[in-house]
Image (cartoon, helix red, strand yellow):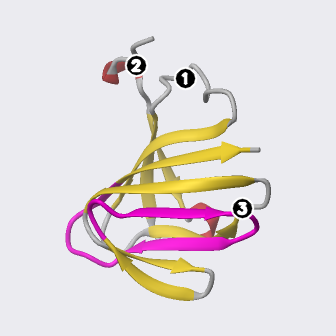
Amino acid sequence: MIIRRASMKGELKTALRGGPGSLTMTDLTGGKGPCKNCRLVSEVLIPPGAGIGHHDHQTETEYYIMLQGTAVVNDNGKDLSVGPGDVVITGDGAAHSITNTGTEPVKMIAVIVTY
């Protein structure tokens, strides 16, 4: 299957998980729904100062694949800087948040795998 970019819809999310500002999430499945054992497959664009609030993952693992920009991730209570090429992995009851601390948008791929 090939999903063309033109069929992918971006959605503006405000205060996602209680985070600051608004960001855009684009469903990379083109509305066809996530693959088996995936709850989410999205491109996420986070403008400077915006982010996703602190939340946990109990019976799933979330991957943030960082493509562009810089951010601070709170990884189980510890603030860490991330940038292009980094991968953030959160699962097994762990919690995280992300805030764009740079001057350009953060672009990342977010994938949530269920088990």
Specify the amino acid type for callout 3: His
Quote the CA–CA distance across marks 1 and 3: 23 Å
Tell me which numbered mark, 1 or 3, is placed earlier along the sequence. 1
User: Quadrant of the image for the C terminus?
Assistant: top right
Q: Is residue 91 left or right of residue 2?
A: right
105 within the magenta span: yes
Q: Are marks 3 and 2 in contact (CB under 8 Å)?
A: no
Q: Which residue is mark 1?
A: 31
Q: Residues within 10 Å of mark 1 (few under 14, many from 20)?
A: few
Please give the name of the residue rendered at 39% of the width and 14% of the height, measured from the top-left corner: 2
Q: Are marks 1 and 3 in contact (CB under 8 Å)?
A: no
Residue 59 shows which numbered tag?
none
Question: Range of the magenta residues?
Answer: 83-107
Q: Mark 1 or mark 3, which is nearer to you?
A: 3
Specify the amino acid type for callout 2: Ser
Quote the CA–CA distance across marks 2 and 1: 8 Å
Disc 2 element: helix
Is residue 34 something one can see in this rendering?
yes
Quote the CA–CA distance across marks 3 and 2: 29 Å
Q: Mark 3 or mark 2, which is nearer to you?
A: 3
Disc 1 element: loop
Tell me which numbered mark, 2 or 1, is placed earlier along the sequence. 2
Q: Is residue 78 left or right of residue 70?
A: right
Q: Which residue is mark 2?
A: 7
Please give the name of the residue rendered at 25% of the width and 65% of the height, measured from the top-left corner: 69
Nearest to the observer: residue 68 or residue 37 = 37
- Residue 78: give x, y in percent of width and height: 54, 88
Specify the amino acid type for callout 1: Gly
Please give the name of the residue rendered at 61% of the width and 47% of the height, measured from the top-left corner: 112
- Residue 89: give x, y in percent of width and height: 54, 62
46 within the magenta span: no
